[in-house]
């Protein structure tokens, strides 16, 4: 029964009186704690906030985080002008290009570009910068003298690495989500063609003669256990604009950074060697992931992998590499370890000469190689990413992404000489702290990996793992995305983790990190960050939500309650029963006939379907390489939806609709 207005007011007054008395009784110590608590979590003064400012709302974070968050830049990739006076950095979270004056060591200008800028490349004349915008599917053309964007060019899905053809007539843009390379004619501003690449192309660099382009693949090509992951480096003929070939890197993925030596004979790529074919008990033995370099002999195509880890210390998430102009030293940023490794190229070349043909795999698994080729480890700020060397070869610049700074390494002393503020707000919110923890390997045994190691771009690595709680060699599971994970619990394929706190807390420490669990404040921050993760714009969905004819037919099939012959479909067998909007999961376990002999259960948690086109492979153990295979190969008895009366066109329509979710 609703109370009269005066009674409601009286009740509120009594609540306020009791609360005030409690605060008074708690004394000055409790008050100071509350004030410090508010300042710590929001960065704001308590008198400017209300109760809800401290309590989590919506999809992660606090109101202060969501509506009054500081403007982080998060510099990702960088380029230095030919005269060495300016440095340009993509501010991935601010949507700008940062122009830094290296003579006075200050941020000189900030130019708005597209959403989530990724790569930056300078035109041969140095007057123009090209910035790839990952969430806009575009490239911003920036007039560096005027300090403004003059044109916006269309590209493929999720533009990432970018390179300018010799002479400046064309752009080559790696389309991260499209598994392709966009070739853009700068005279017309139009995309001339797209070339196929490996999975999730990330970095792009020209050879020294400008005749070839090398494109790295962040993820390995689709495959299943027990086959090891295989990643590719795509080699493109710049003039003919065609793919010349692909260099395979076996048992490797997260191939991101790429650089060609000044001599023009070698290409260096960063990589991670996941041990996903081994049970996860190997974490305690220092054998879950190793991190290193791939060395490609450009004349022969031979690829050799070397490990940059030490036997009892690992350097997680190598992400970029650069070489000094004299070819003596290579610098590798490790975003998970907050370190830059310095590789002696003379000793690396000697190691390659000593490695006979056919012995490459043995070298790739040797943890003692780093003691021979690594000259120094240089500590950096949190999450070092892009690297660039000055034209005179005296300085290597590092984008310290989660510190909003650019660090300058003195090549002679191999230490950080100075840092440049890239617009750091000066305070850290809960979400920012959680992001830093997510990208740090400091909380895993021997620093082997970070959350990001298995969830690049907060998404998936497309690998399958064997965790031991259900028995070794049993319960093989495919990695699941963290994007849009909020509101989809329980978690894990078996649904045993009822909350994200359980997912990232004690169980995570016991079975993966093999160290003490996150302290409460850190766990709160990590969970808040993961709850905040959102999918990029869906490339298959019209801006207004309108469906194409095929998508509309697919929607009708997804929501149907009867077969074509009007035979009713049991409610439990309808697609929409297990996958209702808005998250397209009912958050329950079900038996869809996908169990394998090694599984301990036939029921699995129902995943959400948002942006499912980016989450291959499919099913709990990743056995379905494509959406089509879910029903063409792994639904013979109609246990995963009724599809027995589907034609090929019907299946195509259903998939077209699923891609829009």
Image: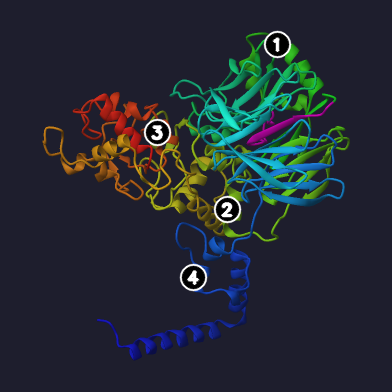
Residue 471 place in picture, x, y as percent: 40, 33
Q: Mark number for residue 471?
A: 3
Sequence order check: which comes first, mark 4 or mark 1?
A: 4
- What is the spatial separation of the Cα atoms under label 2 and label 3, in whole angstroms? 32 Å
The residue closer to the viewer here, 526 or 504, is 526
Question: Counting residues from the N terminus, which is met first, the one under dot 2 or under dot 4?
Answer: 4
Magenta-colored span: 308-325
Q: Is mark 3 on a helix, strand or loop?
A: loop
Q: What element carries label 2?
A: helix
User: Which residue carries the number 2 mark?
Assistant: 434
Magenta-colored segment: predominant secondary structure: loop
Q: Which mark is residue 52?
A: 4
Numbered label attached to residue 299: 1
State the image coordinates of residue 522 (x, y, percent, origin top left).
Answer: 57, 56
Q: Is mark 1 on a helix, strand or loop?
A: loop
Q: Which mark is residue 114?
A: none
Q: Nearer the viewer, residue 454 or 277?
A: 454
């Amino acid at each position: 029964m609703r109370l009269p207005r005066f009674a409601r007011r009286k009740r509120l007054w009594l609540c306020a009186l009791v609360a005030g008395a409690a605060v008074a009784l708690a004394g000055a110590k409790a008050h100071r704690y509350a004030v410090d608590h508010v300042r710590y979590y929001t960065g704001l003064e308590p008198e400017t906030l209300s109760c809800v400012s401290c309590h989590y709302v919506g999809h992660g974070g606090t109101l202060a985080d969501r509506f009054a968050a500081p403007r982080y830049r998060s510099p990702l990739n960088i380029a230095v002008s030919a005269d060495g006076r300016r440095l340009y950095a993509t501010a991935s979270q601010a949507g700008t290009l940062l122009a830094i004056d290296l003579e006075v060591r200050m941020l000189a200008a900030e130019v708005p570009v597209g959403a989530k800028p990724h790569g930056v490349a300078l035109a041969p004349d140095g007057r123009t910068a090209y910035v790839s915008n990952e969430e806009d599917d575009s490239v911003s053309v920036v007039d560096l003298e005027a300090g403004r964007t003059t044109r916006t060019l269309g590209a493929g899905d999720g533009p990432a690495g970018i390179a300018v053809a010799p002479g400046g007539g064309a752009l080559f843009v790696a389309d991260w989500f499209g598994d392709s390379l966009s070739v853009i004619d700068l005279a017309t501003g139009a995309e001339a063609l797209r070339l196929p690449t490996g999975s999730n192309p990330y970095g792009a660099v020209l050879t020294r003669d400008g005749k070839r382009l090398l494109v790295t693949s962040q993820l390995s090509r689709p495959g299943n256990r027990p086959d090891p992951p295989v990643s590719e480096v795509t080699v493109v003929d710049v003039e003919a604009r065609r793919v010349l070939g692909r260099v395979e890197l076996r048992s490797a993925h997260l191939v991101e950074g790429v650089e060609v030596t000044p001599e023009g004979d070698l290409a260096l790529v960063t990589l991670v060697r996941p041990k996903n074919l081994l049970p996860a008990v190997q974490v305690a033995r220092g054998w879950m992931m190793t991190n290193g370099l791939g060395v490609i002999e450009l004349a022969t195509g031979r690829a050799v992998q070397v490990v940059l880890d030490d036997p009892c210390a690992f350097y997680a998430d190598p992400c970029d590499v650069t070489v000094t102009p004299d070819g003596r030293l290579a610098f590798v940023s490790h975003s998970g370890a907050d370190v830059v490794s310095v590789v002696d190229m003379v000793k690396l070349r000697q190691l390659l000469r000593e490695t006979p043909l056919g012995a490459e795999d043995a070298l790739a698994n040797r943890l003692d190689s780093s003691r021979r080729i690594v000259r120094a480890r240089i500590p950096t700020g949190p999450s070092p990413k892009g690297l660039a060397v000055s034209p005179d070869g005296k300085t290597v610049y590092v984008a310290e992404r989660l510190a909003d700074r650019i660090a300058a390494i003195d090549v002679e002393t191999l230490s950080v000489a100075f840092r440049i503020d890239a617009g750091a707000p000066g305070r850290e919110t809960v979400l920012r702290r959680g992001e830093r923890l997510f990208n740090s390997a400091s909380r895993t045994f021997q620093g082997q990996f970070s959350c990001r190691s298995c969830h690049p771009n907060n998404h998936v690595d497309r690998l399958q793992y064997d965790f031991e709680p259900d028995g070794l060699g049993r319960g093989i599971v495919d990695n699941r995305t963290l994007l849009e994970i909020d509101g989809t619990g329980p978690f894990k394929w078996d649904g045993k983790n009822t909350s994200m706190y359980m997912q990232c807390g004690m169980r995570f420490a016991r079975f993966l990190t093999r160290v003490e669990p996150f302290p409460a404040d850190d766990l709160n921050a990590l969970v808040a960050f993961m709850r905040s993760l959102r999918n990029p714009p869906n490339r298959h969905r019209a801006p207004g939500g309108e469906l194409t004819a095929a998508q509309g037919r697919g929607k009708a099939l997804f929501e149907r309650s009867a077969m074509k012959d009007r035979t009713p479909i049991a409610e439990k067998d309808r697609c929409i029963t297990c996958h209702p909007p808005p998250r397209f999961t009912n958050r329950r376990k079900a038996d869809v006939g996908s169990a394998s002999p090694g599984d301990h259960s036939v029921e699995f948690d129902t995943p959400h379907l948002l942006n499912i086109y980016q989450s291959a492979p499919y099913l709990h153990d990743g056995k379905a390489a494509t959406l089509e295979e879910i029903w063409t190969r792994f639904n013979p008895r109609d246990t995963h939806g009724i599809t027995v009366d589907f034609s090929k066109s019907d299946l195509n329509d259903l998939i077209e609709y699923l891609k829009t979710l």
